[in-house]
Amino acid sequence: MIGLIDCNNFFVSCERVFNPAVRTKPVIVFSNNDGCAVAISNEAKALGVKRGDPYFKIKGACNAYGIEIYSGNHKLYGDMSTRVMAVLSAIVPEIDIYSIDEAFLHFETFDRSTLQSTGRDIVRKVRRFTGIPTSLGIAETRTLAKVAARFAKKYPGYRSCCVIDNEEKRRKALELTPLREIWGVGRRLSRKLNDHGIITGLQLADLPVDAVEDLFNVSGKKTWMELNGSPCIGFEPDDQQKQMMCSRSFGKFLTTFDDLAAAVAAFASTVGRKMRERSLCAVSLSVFLYTDGFRSDLPQYYNTAHRTLSEPTADTLTITAAATDALRSIFRKGFAYKKAGLMISELTDSNHIQQSLFSNPADRERRRRLMETVDSINRCTIGHDTVHSGSYSPIDNFVRREKPSRLFSTRLSDIITINCNHGS
Amino acid sequence: MPDSSGHSTSAHIDIFSADVSSSLALPYADNGIQAGFPSPAQDYINESIDLNREIIRHPAATFYGRVEGDSMIDEGIETGDILVIDRSIEPVDGDLSVCCIDGEFTLKRIKLEHDRVWLIPSNETFDPILVTPDKRFEIWGVVTYTIKQNRRPRKKRHTNY
């Protein structure tokens, strides 16, 4: 069995851990790149705010409804993510970090009959240790685990953990899941299937194999098999969102800086290539590492470091340099490291590069390298004039002024203040 | 080398490939290599004291907070002190805890009774708080250490020594 754990409204939850006053209020976190809503609390969703809404459009509503707004504090989110993943890796021997706020948990070695209570314990533990609420879905395949996680989040009755462990539950869950909610079914495919009268996940799963081969490509067929309970999707980190992740558990403990630096350089090269393929640039990145939580006989350590790049880039060398620098700041001698990773926590479209081309004219060498990067981006996207003139509107400054949140968990001058004044 | 045996007549050197598939951790005593009598201090194999390691048992669950106010002054906790807060600890009666009450952080000793919680200050001018069901309340984390700066930074003054 495999589990998918998902942090509920992750960025909002991070802010709420350190700002208990906003726990019951509607909260929106805006991206720094384009000033659009990237995380919305349930209360704000209820007011009609949608993911991607630009700040200027909903500013009035924010004022009118007293919505608390934050500009994305990715250092904080990166640190909280690493904490969540560290707690998870101390409970489950193998985890695949899927994105900043999701991970697959390998339950193969766990007792199947008690997974429901094990799952709830995991959610409870993450909540208690980090303050972050999560939802956990467990099933035979990753695709079904995603379906289960959606139920765990949507219906309080599951108490944050839903297990699909028999045929009856599988059919029931798929019947209640619309096609577009299924992992791997994009909007286009779901529209095409809707035209064929296929509306629910169950209708898709129940298609005969020859129909599946007619309608789908290879990945569509994999989704169909997964919905029918045969695992066939391996682990690929989520690259579709605003972040990119590359991490690895080491076969044997790494103890030296050089070994870890080599691993981090490999991550940088992977994410650099992926970014160039997708015409994306990194604005900032985090490197994290941790020891083996299972080895309570060994000293435990985890840490994460965040770097903001001087300009958005997809240049592997620049990313490697920043990542290595981040690693150096958190590497401590005397620990046996089990896992490390690199996360690009803010990605921006490479169109935005243009701003820095002109805003920093003195730095010729950097510009040349940047141009190389730009060229390779354009090569990677045949038919797209990726870098063209246009205006980048720095809405972020606008948002940033509104409410910068502090680095509660990583900077001493920013830690929470405990009021010891009121005695009533 | 076996194929250059002509160079040496008496010594025989066998070449083996190194087995690097396993690692053996050796204790580390950074005392250099010295001839003669070993330093007795080498028995104490210790790089340095790492307070992080001593104080922080659960790094992923540990946060810091800064005190403002004097409700815990009789315990010696005062404005500016840094609290080491370990959220992984299940709070028990008497623990010094960071609590959230009605959306605000506060620091108190907790007194757990069978159906209610008291928040006990350490300052006689403050009253204990009874957590009533109408309050939004949560024990945010248990304080394991208080870090106090005993030598406060002071303004530079021109002094003649």
Image (cartoon, rainbow, N blue to C red):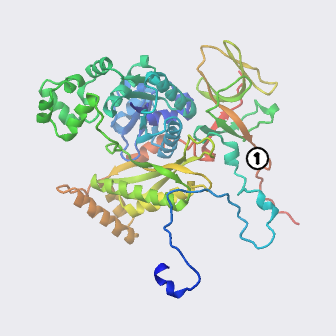
Relative to A348, B77 lies left or right: right
Image: A165 above or below A313: above
Q: Nearer the viewer, residue B28 or A353?
A: B28
Quarter of the image where one finds residue A198: top left
**Rendering coords of residue A20 (x, y %):** 56, 29
**Rendering coords of residue B30 (x, y %):** 70, 64
Q: Nearer the viewer, residue A303 or A415?
A: A303
Task: For label 1, count other residues whose C-alpha is less than 10 Å away and answer few (under 14), some (14-19) or many (20+).
Answer: few
Image: A122 above or below B20: above
Quarter of the image where one finds residue A315: bottom left
**Furthest-front residue in view?**
B10
Kindly tell me whether residue A287 is visible in this rendering.
Answer: no
Quadrant housing the C terminus of chain A: top right
**Chain letter of the residue beneath label 1 in the structure image:** B
Image: A331 above or below A72: below
**Rendering coords of residue A111 (x, y %):** 46, 26
**Rendering coords of residue A270 (x, y %):** 36, 55
Check disc 1 and report its element: helix, strand or loop: loop
The residue type indicated by label 1 comes to Gln
Q: Nearer the viewer, residue A379 or B88?
A: B88
Kindly tell me whether residue A197 is visible in this rendering.
Answer: yes
Total marks shown come to 1
The residue to which callout 1 is attached is: B149
Q: Nearer the viewer, residue A198 or A54?
A: A198
